[in-house]
Amino acid sequence: MRWLALGLALLPAAAGASGLSVPVIGTSRSGPAHVDPAAAYWNPAQLGWLARPTLLAGLSLLYLDADYTRVRRGRYAYEDGLRFQTPVPEDDLDASRSGEADPVRAWQILAAPSGFGALPLGSDLVAGVGFFAPFGAQLDFPDEGAQRYALDAVQLLVVEVAPAIAWHPRPSFTVGAGVGLVAGKLQLDRVQDLAGTPLLRDALGNPPIGQPNAFGPDAPSEVRELLVLSRPVRIGPAYGLTWAARAGAAWRPADDWLLGVSYTHRVPLTFRGAFRLDMNDPFFTQDLAAQGLQYPAIVRGKAEVEFPLPSSLHVGAAWQADARWSLDVSGAWFRHSQVDALTATLRSDSLVQPELGLGDTAEVRLPREWVDTFQVEVRATRARDAGGYVGGLLGLHSGASPDATLDVASPDGPRVAAAAFVGWPVREWLLHGDAHLQYVLPRENKGSRHDLANGTYSLIVGALTVAATRSFE
């Protein structure tokens, strides 16, 4: 049954890439060179400049909007056909399964609360803690849409509780470090095309079945997406619990300059839960029983899916130009190339096929081949009377997903980021409000491996954030 399991490894890969990361943690002003309690995430060293106990609490309304129009560039057999070997006769090829398919869209509004605090412990130590959601998505595409072989629906939430501490070895220099407890929940629905699995090729091609076929990871489009081999699968609900670690440094070379750098270690997140595979077709439940291949209509078992979050490096510089104007430039490097594949392990007594030598456990890998990403953002802020401010942000981000593995589960690409933010004092509190938008430029893909996901993609990630800060005596 290992050949059935190969496709079950697919996660909403954009969550591990930059596609569905939450655009605001703290406020749109927060970053590696900004002093606020959200430094527990961005750069623990910046906590060291907070001289009084300080709280930052906020709520973001996240807007996700993914659009995809598939363009089939390969040739496909009739969906109800049973041609497993190439070349497929011309009479068995369906000319209507070519060109542009109906567009599909999924959108959702989610709420993401966050909270941060900082507490000076003496003349040279400041402790901090944060609670936030770095990744989140809830998307539901049409069940019969052309995207269904990559993703039908996904529910993903990753949250972190991150204590940190900063130390002043010198008055103009701070260092900081923090650890975090990371928890996640995942549920994923998709249709798995079993023709793309190498062990199906072997299980059918070798004795005792001996059915010639062109299946496997390099299977041509002519034998893909046949109804009999298109099996609905669900992974989840699955849960993960792991740790995170980050460290940083900050330096004031002059009164009007603040520099910062921070590093976040790779997070080894693994989801564990259930899986459900619909095998309710006579081809799998009865037709090959005499040859040793027979499964129940529904296969259930336990799933373990590795979903590592890559390491990252953040740098920033903030300049106080005069009494009112300040400029902040930040950059980041995300090591997405550390993730070349996602791995899943499935266990079920229903997987056992003794005559074919298949046991109850399968370990499989799904190539992603992500590349490192970079981003640059510039913030300008003008101070107003009594501690208020107004400002804006512009940024450019690169994408992690190459053409070969791009799909709606990894809808990433070059993007433009923009935000407008404002702060105003209300008694002892400073209230923050900002609107943040990230727009993935429309991307036409002609290089999808084996024509699995060619077409045009676009993605919008937005956030409306309201937050409040207060310092205590």
Image (tube, rainbow, N blue to C red):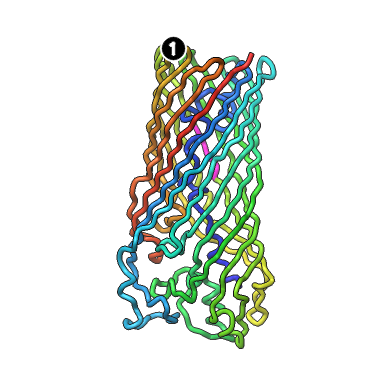
Judged left or right of residue 374, residue 339 is right
Magenta residues span 310-314
Please indicate, yes or no, whether residue 368 appears anywhere in the rendered image. yes
Asked if 431 appears above or below 360 in the picture, the reply is above
What is the residue that sits farthest to the front in this orientation? 427
Q: Residue at x 30, y 74 (%)?
A: 95
Circle 1 SS class: helix
Where the N terminus falls, by quadrant? Answer: bottom right
- Residue 313 counted in the magenta span: yes
Q: Residue 82 at x, y = what percent?
A: 44, 81
Question: Can residue 216 be seen from the camera position used here?
Answer: no
Which residue in the protein does label 1 denote?
385
Are there few (<14), some (14-19), or many (20+) residues within 10 Å of tag 1?
few
Residue at point 49%, 56% (across, down): 368
- Furthest-bottom residue in this view: 290
Q: Position of residue 115 (x, y in %)?
A: 59, 31
Q: Position of residue 374 (x, y in %)?
A: 43, 40
Residue type at the position of mark 1: Asp
Most common secondary structure along the magenta stretch: strand
